[in-house]
Image (cartoon, rainbow, N blue to C red):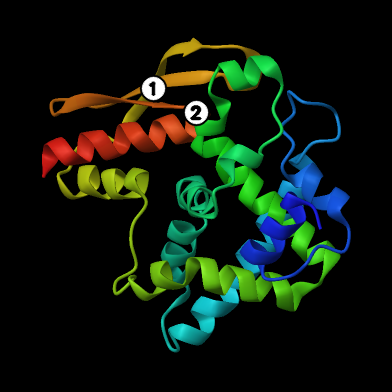
């Protein structure tokens, strides 16, 4: 078996039947047209279903709203990127030279997408049970630590402003930089009469989340 096949067998829990699927899951758009995007689309849905069923079983009687908070906290790009780093995905990414020079392998956005693509590849190659077993093993401690349903930073900031009878937070793009394959956003969030903070990310959503988190920290 190749080094990649050995790593996949050890990390995902199954020897790959179709190695090409996993190679595609590890391929960034800067490397070629046959990249991880379609597998990421599928893997995102498979991951969501696995975690939703897991939470349904783990928290019987908990209302839909709280289950949704838990689900949203467990399938974020940040969490998936953390899983990717634990799996040591970075050295196995297939990147174009410019993307490699730009440090795309450090991006939470890219690493998170690749983990979802690998889940999609595992589902297609071996089936739902194998994908379920991998997710439960990789995410296990994170689910166990969720004693209370967490809130997304943007939702928490929105609730804080409502409780303080303030206007809702306003987000604006301060700067966009970098090449198309590694676009970087700087976004500022402000609450009138309270303050503002900035966040950075490789997507607007990621930057808004970081900005909301930064402002919340100043309010606590």
The residue lying toward the viewer, choosing from 9 and 201, is: 9
Q: Does residue 116 appear to the left or right of 203 in the view shown?
A: right
Q: Which residue is mark 2?
A: 204
- Quarter of the N terminus within the rendering: bottom right
Residue 67 in sight in this render: yes
Q: Is residue 211 above or below residue 86?
A: above
Residue at image coords 76%, 56%: 5
The location of residue 56, given as percent across then percent down, is 52, 81
Q: Which residue is mark 1?
A: 187
Q: Distance from label 2 to label 1 (Cα)?
A: 7 Å
Q: Quadrant of residue 174?
A: top left
Residue 41 in sight in this render: no
Q: Residue furthest bottom?
A: 60
Residue at image coords 73%, 50%: 4
Q: Does residue 124 appear to the left or right of 142 in the view shown?
A: right
The location of residue 165, given as percent across then percent down, is 17, 43
């Amino acid at each position: 078996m190749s080094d990649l096949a050995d790593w996949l067998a050890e990390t995902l829990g199954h020897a790959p039947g179709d190695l090409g699927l996993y190679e595609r899951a590890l391929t960034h758009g800067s490397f070629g047209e046959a990249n991880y995007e379609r597998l990421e689309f599928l893997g995102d849905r498979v991951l969501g279903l696995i975690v939703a069923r897991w939470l349904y079983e783990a928290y019987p009687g908990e209302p839909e709203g709280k289950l949704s908070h838990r689900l949203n906290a467990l399938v974020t790009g940040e969490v998936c990127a953390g899983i990717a780093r634990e799996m040591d995905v970075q050295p196995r990414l297939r990147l174009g030279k410019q993307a490699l020079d730009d440090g795309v392998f450090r991006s939470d956005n890219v690493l998170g997408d690749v983990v979802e693509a690998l889940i999609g590849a595992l589902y297609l190659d071996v089936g739902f049970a194998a994908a379920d077993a991998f997710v439960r093993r990789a995410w296990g401690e994170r689910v166990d630590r969720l004693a209370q349903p967490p809130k997304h930073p943007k939702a928490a900031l929105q609730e804080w402003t409502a409780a303080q009878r303030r206007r809702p937070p306003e987000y604006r793009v301060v700067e966009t930089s970098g090449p198309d394959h590694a676009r970087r956003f700087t976004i500022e969030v402000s609450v009138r009469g309270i303050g503002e903070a900035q966040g950075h990310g490789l997507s607007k959503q990621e930057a808004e989340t970081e900005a909301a988190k930064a402002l919340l920290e100043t309010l606590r």
